[in-house]
Image: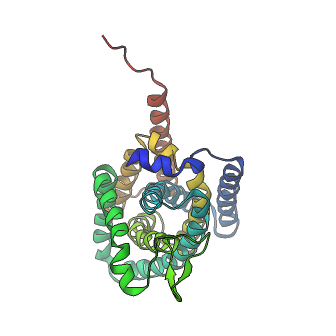
Amino acid sequence: MEPAARRSNADVSAPSSRNLAWVIVWVGLGLALGLWVAATQGRNAATEYYGAYLLEESLSVDNIFVFIMIFSELHVPAEYQRRVLWFGVVGALVFRALAIGAGISLIERVQWIIYPFAALILFAAWRLLFGGERERKVVQEACDVCGTWIARIIRVTPVLKGHAFWRREGGRMAATPLLVALVVIETSDIVFALDSIPAVLAVTRNPLIVYSSNVMAMLGLRSLYFVLSDAVYRMRYLRGGIAAILVFTASKMLANEWVQVSAGVSVAIIAVVLLSTIAASLWQKGTPAPAQS
């Protein structure tokens, strides 16, 4: 699977200066929003925002793995992927606004809901560590179903028509593989939201901070995908680091009644774990292979 994903994204794997510039712009805006939160809601709220934003950015890396598999399985050329991701991000922002509102409302009304939320976060950590093959299978099954369950709702054609989601065949409109990719991406984001939203609610219950951190991470995700689509496979410890962050977040949620962990400490722990795993991955990549006897 890995080489196939790389081959199908050959044009994307070499990060262009434009994509890198957009990543810098979105990260800069995300950090700047934290300064606005500090000015309007105080220092503690800003610390919570940075913790939530850093957590969302970390979890967005997992989205990139799945995007690569979806585009590879559906054979979507690199030049058409940007439009699919744009619509995917817009749809995700709408869904997450509804999910965040529902999640905060549940926590306020049903206190014990934090335990199922913590279980979801721990399951997400397990999936990152041990669910790679299962994740590939789910995406492949979704793509195999393109001619069955999706076709039961709308007509599907395997033929692309530029950037269009629809094309006319035999006098009837049919969905192109771009629309199929968009449907799979949107449904996949529902699964990601079940992981990320409970994790962010463990950092803060402020709806503005929760949603704004999601928005800033999602808006930069498209450019980040084109920069990191190949590099994520070389970061061999990155998924383990993200899993460790999720375990810490779930533990914090479960132990909140007895142990109070400040937002500042949470930010520091998330940053240290994330940077350490990236550094370890880069060091491992640069370590010479042992001599063969």
Q: Which residue lies furthest to the front in this view?
A: 170
Residue 109, given in percent of the width and then of the height, sits at: 36, 84
Q: In this view, does 196 lie above or below 100?
A: above
Residue 106, given in percent of the width and then of the height, sits at: 37, 81
Residue 68, given in percent of the width and then of the height, sits at: 47, 56
> Is residue 283 among what the camera can see?
yes
On-image quarter of the C terminus = top left
Q: Is residue 165 left or right of residue 131?
A: right
Q: Is residue 283 above or below residue 267?
A: above
Front-lying residue, 111 or 148: 148
Q: Residue furthest bottom?
A: 171
Q: Is residue 156 left or right of residue 80?
A: left
Residue under the image location 62 percent in, 57 percent down: 223
- Where, by quadrant of the figure, is residue 254 drawn? bottom left
Front-lying residue, 233 or 201: 233
Q: How is the image coloured?
A: rainbow
Residue under the image location 49 percent in, 26 percent down: 286
Residue under the image location 47 percent in, 38 percent down: 276
> Is residue 257 among what the camera can see?
no
**Number of callouts:** 0
Q: Residue furthest top?
A: 293
Q: Is residue 60 left or right of residue 107?
A: right
Q: Is residue 84 above or below residue 130?
A: below
